[in-house]
Image: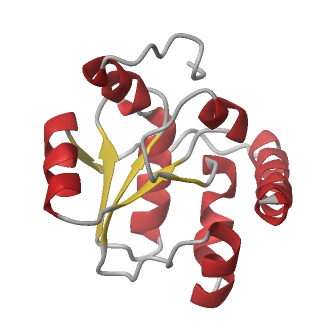
Amino acid sequence: MNTVRRVLSRLYFAGRGAAAHSNSPPAHTMSAEITYGELNKQIADGPVQIFDVRTPEEVEKGKIPDAVNIPVTAFQEAFKMDPETFAKTFKVNKPKLDDNFVVHCYMGKRGAQAADIATGMGYAHVRNLLGGYKEWAEKEGIPSEGVGHF
């Protein structure tokens, strides 16, 4: 677990530095979305990969079961990893370009950014959880106040 934290920390802060120095305007997001109900159906129908793109500190306060934390600031670098390194780092298989997977953050903005990054890298079936963890937690009856950034 310490290795994962170190890698995430390096990727997170490397991404923050790059983002802080970017003069580019925010990209318009065109990511596909998935609703709470659709996600629960996918979970019930079989395994689904879920990537939580919030910070590790946010995830410690609450998460969707089995979601793998890769902060949005580290997402692109993580998905550039070869499958073996990705699996060693995150303890899950790296999705193939045609695999279905879901990303989410607290309310949706960072999830949309991660979905756009994945789509730009060639992933054809990535969807952002509409309403993010906040809506998921509310519908599950789990308090979500103070769990995310706005």
Q: Is residue 73 above or below residue 59?
A: below
61 vs 35, left or right, is right
Q: How many marks?
A: 0
Q: Is residue 15 above or below residue 98?
A: above
Q: Nearer the viewer, residue 84 or 115?
A: 84
Q: Which quadrant of the structure image shows residue 33?
A: top left
Which residue is drawn at the image coordinates 47% and 51% (left, top)?
A: 67
90 vs 117, left or right, is right
Which residue is drawn at the image coordinates 76% and 56% (left, top)?
A: 8
Q: Nearer the viewer, residue 3 or 125?
A: 3
Q: Position of residue 95 (x, y in %)?
A: 43, 76
Q: Is residue 90 above or below residue 148?
A: below
Q: If the image is split into quadrants, where does the N terminus sit? A: bottom right
Q: Position of residue 90 (x, y in %)?
A: 63, 68
Q: Nearer the viewer, residue 29 or 112?
A: 112
Q: Is residue 92 above or below residue 140?
A: below
Which residue is drawn at the image coordinates 40% and 77% (left, top)?
A: 122
Q: Position of residue 76 (x, y in %)?
A: 61, 64
| Rendered image coloring scheme | secondary structure
Q: Position of residue 104 (x, y in %)?
A: 43, 43
Q: If the image is split into quadrants, where does the C terminus sit? A: top right
Q: Which quadrant of the structure image shows residue 54?
A: top right
Q: Which quadrant of the structure image shows residue 59?
A: top right
84 vs 114, left or right, is right
